[in-house]
Each structure stands twice: as structure tokens, then as C-alpha cells.
Image (cartoon, grey):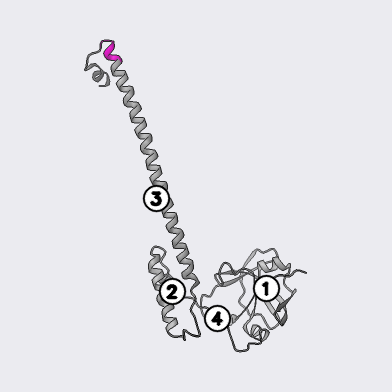
Amino acid sequence: DSNGSLQVYGIDFLKEASNGEMGYLNLVDQNGTLTGSNYVAEPNMGECVILWKVAELLNVSIGDLIHINYQQYSLDVEVVAICEQDLKFTELENALIIINLEQAQSFMQREGEINLIMGTIKNPQSIYVVSDIDFTKRQIREIGTRIQQRLDPNAYTVAMPKLQEISAQQFMLMGMTIIFWFITIISMLITGILINSILSTSTEERIREYGILRVVGGKKMFPVKMVI
């Protein structure tokens, strides 16, 4: 038996499935290898779906029971599927025990309540423009503002994790651009120094040869005639 501190999410599987691209739960086998199928059902009461990292941490497989304790609440759930999440949660949310929304509300004794509503943008290709990050940020902020205007700001807040990720990527892109230009300038300087050294050496050799020819009696036009 193993134990640990993990996150438990209660979600409405059916509503998420009927509301478009809300991410996927990709099924894996007992070795953690993707099977090529998605989990499209909904766990019943007393059942759960876990991510692969949880299966590794707790050393559990399909059919095993997981005992959950939270403050004064406790719950036993059976593992019915092991998955890898694909754009359903953030990258940091990779060790989750997922139960249906009704089970979570009953477990927390908060029937009819939820913590948050998560949504995605329809036609994201019209919003997320890789070549113009500033445009993308403006569009996302405008969408967030419209949503917030429909809600009571004293009771609800709008979180935009993708906007934060885009801002972080923009900062990283600026850093990479600066490094690229720095390397380019250094390369040009090194190339210029090498070319100057080669030309200087070649010129010195030509002058030396010309001097030798003059010493041994060559006329002024003799070196030119040799080249021609």
C-alpha cells in the first residue's frame, strides 16, 4: 500500500464531451503505453479515473481501491481507467484522481455547488496567431473582459492560464532572439577578423615577393608581367 497527497477533481464528463474540444483523457495500458483510445464514458458513484502518474505513485491498477481522506471526509473509489491527459488540464496537473461531479459534491457535502467553470475558445485558429503574439494577447484579454462584464466581479473572477503561458513564451522568445542576434554579431566579428588577417598576410607576402624581385634586378613592370 502507498499513500500521498494528491488532487481530486470532480468534473461533469458528459457536459464536457458535448461542449466541443475540452481536451482528452487518453487511455493507457498497465505499462503506461498509450492504447490509441480515449476515455469517453463517465465513472459511476464509487468509481474514479486516474492519471498515469497516480498509478505509479500509489502502485495501483484497474480494479484497485483508492481510499481518499480530506479533513473530516473520507471516500473509497475503484479505479476504472488509467489515462494521460491531453490539453484537458495544465501540464502541472499531471497527478489527478478524477471522479464525477455528483460524487465530488456528495463527498464534500456541497451538493449543487462547483468551484470553477472551465471553457475553451471556439475556432482557436482565429485567435492564436503564432506570428503575432501581441495580437493574440489582445484578443484573449478582450474575451476575458467580455466574460467578466457578464459576472459579478465581487463573486467571480476570470482566470486565463493560456494568456499567462503565452506571455511567458513571449518573454522566452525575446530572450532567444537576443541570444541569436548576439551570436550573429559575434560570428560576423570573428569572420571579419579572419578575413582581415588573411588579406593582411597575403598583402605582406606580395610586398615581400615584390621586394625580392626588385633586389635581384627585376624592373618595376616585371611582377605585373609575371601575373599576366
Q: Amino acid at mark 1?
A: Ala
Where residue 134 sits, quadrant-wise, is bottom left
Pointer 2 and pointer 4: residues touching (CB < 8 Å)?
Answer: no
Q: Which residue is mark 2?
A: 123
Q: Which residue is mark 3?
A: 181
Pointer 4 and pointer 1: residues touching (CB < 8 Å)?
Answer: no
Where residue 114 sits, quadrant-wise, is bottom right
Query: In the shown orientation, is residue 106 left or right of residue 173?
Result: right
Which label's residue is closer to the chain start, 2 or 4? 4
Residue 44 higher or lower than 29, as above or below? below
Kindly identify the residue that appears in the image at 41 percent across and 54 percent down.
177
Q: Which residues are magenta?
A: 212-217
Residue 203 position in % (x across, y down): 31, 26
Q: CA distance from mark 3 to mark 2?
A: 35 Å
Name the secondary structure under disc 1.
strand
Q: Amino acid at mark 4?
A: Leu
Q: Which residue is mark 4?
A: 116
Name the secondary structure under disc 4.
loop
Q: Which residue is mark 1?
A: 81
Residue 210 position in % (x across, y down): 28, 18
The mark tally for this picture is 4
* Nearer to me, 70 or 132: 70
Q: Main secondary structure of the magenta part?
A: helix
Where residue 52 sits, quadrant-wise, is bottom right
Residue 163 higher or lower than 47, as above or below? above
Which label's residue is closer to the chain start, 4 or 1? 1
Which tag is nearer the camera, tag 3 or tag 2?
Answer: 3
Name the secondary structure under disc 3.
helix
Q: Amino acid at mark 2?
A: Asn
Which label's residue is closer to the chain start, 3 or 1? 1
Q: CA distance from mark 3 to mark 1?
A: 49 Å
Q: Quadrant of the C terminus?
A: top left
